Image (tube, rainbow, N blue to C red):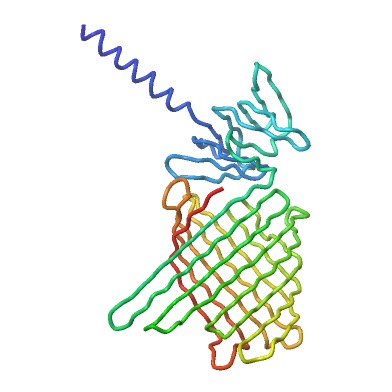
Amino acid sequence: MKKIIIPLILFCLWTFFPLQSVHADVISLENGSTLIGTISRIDQKTILVQTDFAGVVSVDAARVLSYTTDKPVYVAFPGHEPVRGKLTYTKKQTRIDAAEGQVLVSADAPEHVWPEGAPDPRARHWSFEVGVDVAGKTGNAERISVGSRAQARLQGPRDRLLLYLRYAYAKDDGIESDNQAVGGIDFESYFREKHSWYARAEAENDQIAALDLRVTAAAGYGYFFLKKANHTLRGRTGLMFRHESLKGESSKGTAGLDLGISHLYRFDNAWRLTNDVTYTPSLEDYRDYRICHESAFEIPIVASEIWKLRLGVMNDYNSRPAENKDYLDTTYFTRLVFSWQ
């Protein structure tokens, strides 16, 4: 009896584990390695793979020899409607095993691939984010600070619209030390692979800096020095107009340049590093300018990336502040962020 049971157990184990291992997408690379996981998105430059061991991994499509999907996905070629089916890709051809036994073969690589239930990457889609940070201190000094940020992003293959709102409040020993609200809109249209044009507007109120209202509008040209799924570096140059109303002073308008640089790097484990700097000097007097800077490090708390922890610093330098006010405002934050689509 034992002679029958033991081989039967071994056979069941051998049968079970291979079946588990093949229920995944397989990507073969030029260096001979194989990546196993679930393909979450493919375009002509990048393949994003969800793995059990390293989270979301970004793979350069140019280094891929072949890939296969275990489940039906949507496959889109330039100028054609998407087709649903299991996908097998090699350097020589793309094969789609569609419904009812239909097989489609093309010598072209897919333009986009996405799984069932995911948004069509060719269409605009909204994503939202809300973040809050609260800090306090008691003892020799009393301090309480609250910060929040909300944003909505409409992303498409050819353009991007960003709406944002942020607020910061702080009290030190019962005296207000921060009370600022900022809201803005930023639109960018990509008219070539690395070229874009943009328009943005921002309104700000800062009670501590004696600022009733500052409105900035700008438009110009953008260029992507790097444009990868996990690494982007973009520069901007344009013209801006700023209107300021300070307490106890007459309002003024300033025309100037709008110069900025934005950097994003996404690690293989989905951690993100972002850096943004904007420099807006006046055309009438180069000594009248503002520099706004923000750097942040973002860590997903759960694998779905819905909850994230963002650590960062913001600097706002004004070369012509209100009377008896500092040139530089610096804010450090540790923010809990909730995002969804």
Tell which of 318 and 213 is nearer to you. Answer: 213
Query: In the displayed structure, would residue 293 be above or below residue 43?
Result: below
The answer to whether 20 appears left or right of 2 in the picture is: right
Query: In the displayed structure, would residue 217 be above or below residue 193?
Result: below
| Quarter holding residue 67 | top right
The answer to whether 96 appears left or right of 50 in the picture is: right
| Quarter holding residue 104 | top right
Q: Residue furthest top?
A: 1
Tell which of 171 and 45 is nearer to you. Answer: 171
Q: Residue at x 47, y 26 (%)?
A: 22
The answer to whether 284 appears left or right of 21 in the picture is: right
**Relative image position of residue 301 (x, y in whole percent):** 41, 52
Q: Quadrant of the N terminus?
A: top left
Query: In the displayed structure, would residue 113 be above or below residue 278?
Result: above
Q: Residue at x 52, y 80 (%)?
A: 329
**Relative image position of residue 263 (x, y in whole percent):** 60, 63
Q: Residue at x 72, y 72 (%)?
A: 217
Total marks placed = 0
**Relative image position of residue 30 (x, y in whole percent):** 58, 38
Q: Residue at x 51, y 53 (%)?
A: 339
**Relative image position of residue 56 (x, y in whole percent):** 50, 45
Q: Residue furthest left?
A: 2
